Image (spheres, grey):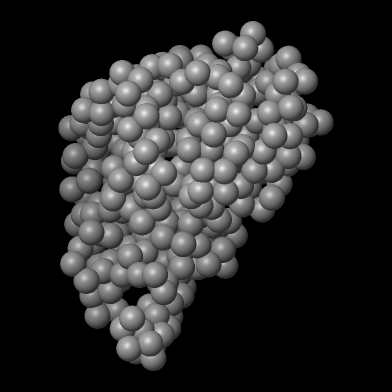
Amino acid sequence: MTEKRAPRDIVRLIGAHQSFVICGHMRPDADCIGSQLALYHALTRLAREAAMWLPDKVPSNCLFLPGSGAIRSTQSPAPLSGVAIVLDTPRPERLGWIAEYVSSLAVVVNIDHHESNTSWGTHNWADAGAAATAELIYLLLKEMKVAIDLDIATCLYAGIITDTGRFCYSNTTPFTHRLAGELIQCGLSPEAVAEKIYAQNRPEKMRFLGEVLNTLTIDAGGALASLRITAEMYEKSGALSEDTEGFINYARDLAGVKVAVLFEEAADHKSVRVSLRSRDKHINVDEIAGKYGGGGHPAAAGAVIQGEPRRVEGRFLEDVRGAIARAREAERISGGK
């Protein structure tokens, strides 16, 4: 990502309004929540009224982020008012039950870094070159002339390390590292943040992970790895939906794997949540997910597909195998370059 300036019309809009509602997507992650909180701290410092809403609760590993207790997730809130600023959300459907409240507002600002962003909202700033939405919020705060203090730095840093896979994913850029360095200079401890996010696992999650790993299937000559989560596994282990965060990486990180898929059956067995990861530049999982109404990034995407779970899985895996076959052919033609 280049260090371009945040869109000035968004800064002018913020300067012209007093009340804001900052929203994020279903099953929020640290990038979504950290971006929300960083902007919330900035707006309150500028004497603006700001409320934060999520369609789901803040996961336990993000509760340490400064201000997280102010985020609301109870359904049927009082009618929202002011300017909606929706973060890390490529499509309005990802807002879940909050979507109808946001759609009732006259001004909706959408700030996001997903390639699948549908350019929705009255003001849209979608930059797929950003490693995380937190990077965009940093640029926005700079344009707003808001100093980055320890609280804001901690929130932004949490979003960046999670969406870059601790700086291991291909979306990590020189700008990402420079920004991380600047945030660390604000006084945060990288060790302490990582400890809170990654090292607070409950025994129930570990037992749950064991059940999920037992479903591991290798296909397409070792290039495709898939995992499955059923409603019964949740009941047996006492795990929570947030516990699945990072599970797909156990499939992704296998030697020789090009695409990893995680299927999660709905409790009513009528739909499946699918997560995808790609380690091959010729395989764009955003395109695969897009066929089913989902999306994300070329290397990480997802979708929710209606239908009987086993049939959905079979059809979906056929599409992934096809993508792998085309990638192999492209690599053969290019001579492996």
Residue 287: % across, % down: 53, 67
Q: Residue furthest bottom?
A: 333
Number of numbered callouts drawn: 0
Using residue 79 as the reference point, say whether residue 167 is left or right of it.
left
Asked where in the image residue 191 lies, by quadrant, the reply is top left
Q: Is 206 on the left or on the right of 25, as rendered?
A: left
Left or right, 38 with respect to 181, comes to right
Vertical arrangement, residue 263 with respect to residue 233, above or below: below
Asked whether 283 or 262 is in front, the reply is 283
Answer with left or right where residue 280 lies relative to residue 50. Answer: left
Q: Nearer the viewer, residue 292 or 179?
A: 179
Determine the residue positioned at 21% across, 49% down.
211
Position in image of residue 72 (x %, y %) = 54, 20
Q: Residue at x 29, y 42 (%)?
A: 166
Q: What is the x, y in percent for residue 184? A: 31, 26
Residue 208 is at least partly visible in this image: yes
**Residue 276 visible somewhere in the drawing:** no
Residue visible at 62% across and 12% down in the picture = 46
Q: Is residue 207 above or below residue 196?
A: below
**The C terminus lies in quadrant:** bottom left
- When asked about the image quadrant of residue 335, the answer is bottom left
Q: Residue 240 placed where, x, y %? A: 34, 35
Quadrant position of residue 186: top left
- Where 215 sits versus 163, above or below? below
174 or 215, nearer to the observer:
174
Which residue in the rendered view is the most extreme toward the right? 106
Q: Who's the residue at 57% across and 49% down the image?
A: 127
